Amino acid sequence: MATTTHDTETEVQDRAILVSLVTDKIKRTGIDPELSLQELVQLAETAGVEVLDVLRQNKETPDSRWFIGKGKVEELRMAADGLGANTAIFDQELSGAQVRNLEEALDLKIIDRTQLILDIFAGRAKTREGIIQVELAQLSYLLPRLSGQGKNLSRQGGGIGTRGPGESKLETDRRHIRERITELKRQLDEVVKTRELHREHRRKSGAVQVALVGYTNAGKSTLLKQLTDADVYIENQLFATLDPTSRVLQLPGGKEVVLTDTVGFIQNLPHDLVASFRATLEEVNEANLVLHVVDSSSPMREEQMEVVQTILQDLGAAGKPQIVLFNKIDLCQPEQLEMLPTGEGFLKISAFNEEDLSRITEIINDQLAGDTLIFRIPGDRGDLSSLLYRVGEVLEQDYDGSDVLYNVRLNKEDYDKWSYKLAEFVEPQ
């Protein structure tokens, strides 16, 4: 079995030409090729790749042999020779045969969009769950493509396309990889069961959950840090944080909610990645409220919002109560600000503005507040008194003999959850 060369060879930086093929099928799906290509540039830079040039081609259907046309292959070869490129990165997914044919024709490392994203995720995963999910996605992607990975595996010096499972694992046969996939799925099932136990505990404890969702690099992690003083990694790059982080957020009325930062979305998120991260993404389904964080300074803002809504729909979370937070307004031009929607359910904010952070907690509080009820609690039932403070907003407290009267704002979902304990103590109004 061959061994990885990462420790013995000097890593050579990938110097890449990016390639985008726009087919009739892509046009029909409504995917914006330019947005996708701009993201590919960002993805490549996030992976440490030096982008030298971009080639585009319009074609009815992909070429079965090279994906792009034969003439474009020659153009790519000449551009690579002239610029000193050692890698070509394609904005669409390639088959194993196409990778092999392109490598033979160009003598370049061939990477597609999916492999590039998986490579970035491999460098971002820190928790056991994240590491398992990424390796499972990588092996699921690579298994049908093993015959097309020859030069990628034999090249020295590492770089994109060699992170995660490692070169030695990829040179084993399909049977060993299938066995590894089976083992990873077993391990992931254990993690999923543990995650479900945590969810069940949160449900039973009456914890209200708020999920931060949005396009990658919209500022979700920054918001989590600013709102809760969470110790999370923040960087101006795609997928800066991968593993979900949950922290307690205290609302103006004293009620505490669990605020969860989820993995960022992106156009054409690889299928294998979505499948592997489904348990993580489904945290959104447990949320009482979704905060959709948008980079309001992005020229592709509307397209990015549409991608997020599509993924929420796929996850079954599109019907959740949602507030759209137009973040990064400090980076917006005046005309960009004027075009942002206003009114109920929309908020223009900067994650670094204290007043805006206060407005966010107030709107969360109002959204979750619900109806106002009066509870008559016997003085010796401190457990019920603490429950009211935990699940609702106590507006007023008074005494009537040995009983305590609580004026509480409580949403219907929380009341239904705890009515078996509280219903008999509600005062008629």
Image (cartoon, rainbow, N blue to C red):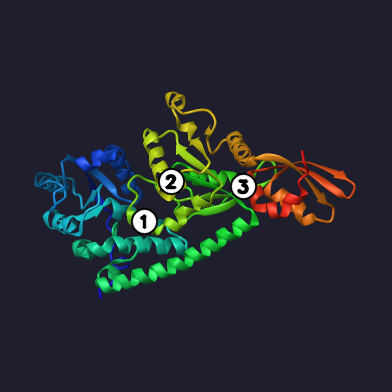
Q: Where does residue 254 sit, x and y in percent of width and height?
A: 70, 45
Gap in Å between the C-alphas at discs 3 and 2?
21 Å
In the image, taking residue 77 as reference, residue 302 lies left or right, namely: right
Is label 2 in a helix, a strand or a loop? helix
Circle 2 is placed at which residue position? Answer: 312
Q: Mark 2–mark 1 contact, CB under 8 Å? A: no
Q: Where does residue 39 sit, x and y in percent of width and height?
A: 33, 43
Relative to 53, does residue 273 appear above or below in the rendering?
Answer: below
Circle 3 is placed at which residue position? Answer: 413
Q: Residues within 10 Å of mark 2 (few under 14, many from 20)?
A: many
Q: Is residue 172 visible?
A: no
Q: Which amino acid type is shown beneath numbered disc 3?
A: Glu
Mark identifier at residue 273: 1
Q: Is residue 423 visible?
A: yes
Q: Mark 3–mark 2 contact, CB under 8 Å? A: no
**Dot placed on the residue nearer the N-terminal end, 3 or 2:** 2
